[in-house]
Image: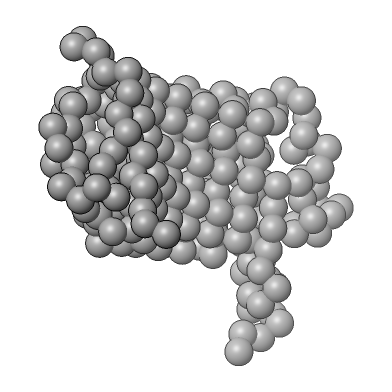
Amino acid sequence: MASFSTSSRDIRSDQSTLLAFKAHVTDPHSVLTQNWSMSYPICSWVGISCSSRHHRVTAFNLSAIGLEGTIPPHLGNLSFLVYLDISDNNFYGHMPNELAQLRRLKFINFSNNKLSGSFPSWIGVLSKLQRLSLSNNNFSGLIPDSLYNLSRFGNLHTLMLDSNKFTGRLPENIGNWSKLSFLYLGDNYLQVIPSTSDRPEHRSAIASTTPMLNQFVLKLKRPA
């Protein structure tokens, strides 16, 4: 069992990481300026939740508060983080490689920002990831095999990549991946999947495909 001094030191490390994040981003509505202060316990800061067992930051939810800037690499130091949501802000640039250190992550939502660059292949090492949303950004290029493997052999059940600039072809057997329940790929430059499954319960509902830009939402339905 961790000593009090060790736990105190660890939460101070998380606090330093969050203060570095605060200093890195632009906060036009002063949400963090007014709340993220040494005068308040870190676990009471807006958007932050801590575990009762380890007293470490486990959830980081700063969605829709108007933050601007690049995603700082400091977030990779929040080693107990399970939930990460910075959706509906104005973040731009790439997703830093340091986020690969967050091996406990189960939920990532970076949708509705201005992020760009290639798909971060390091996401494939996040074996506990269950839900990933990068919708409505400017990501481009191929979706890496590491993500397909995570969907097939890991715990990923929801994958939302719609409204980006992804290219390439998806595996034809994607409908057979037992844990993948929802796959959203509309408004990309992906090639149409000719047949996702021979099993009726795995057949996809694909809408709004065009020869130039394949726009579709693929939703896999599982039997009850």
Tell me how the rendering is colored.
one colour
> Where, quadrant-wise, is the N terminus in this rendering?
bottom right
Between 64 and 163, the one lying in front of the other is 163
Q: Is residue 181 visible?
A: yes
> Where, quadrant-wise, is the C terminus in this rendering?
bottom left
Say how many tags the image has: 0
Residue 2 lies in what quarter of the image?
Answer: bottom right
Relative placement, left or right, of 58 versus 186 is: right
Residue 171 location in percent, x, y?
15, 42
Tell which residue pokes out farthest to the front in this image.
Answer: 200
Residue drawn at 45 percent across, 39 percent down: 133
Tell which residue pokes out farthest to the top in this image.
Answer: 212
Residue drawn at 28 percent across, 38 percent down: 204
Residue 13 location in percent, x, y?
61, 61
Residue 95 location in percent, x, y?
40, 37
Relative placement, left or right, of 78 versus 100 is: right
Q: Is residue 129 visible?
A: no
Residue drawn at 79 percent across, 56 percent down: 44
Tell which residue pokes out farthest to the right in this image.
Answer: 39
Residue drawn at 51 percent across, 26 percent down: 113
Residue 135 lies in what quarter of the image?
Answer: top left
Residue 68 location in percent, x, y?
60, 25
Residue 209 lies in what quarter of the image?
Answer: top left
Is 86 drawn above or below residue 174 in the view shown? above
Tell which residue pokes out farthest to the bottom in this image.
Answer: 1
Relative placement, left or right, of 103 versus 69 is: left
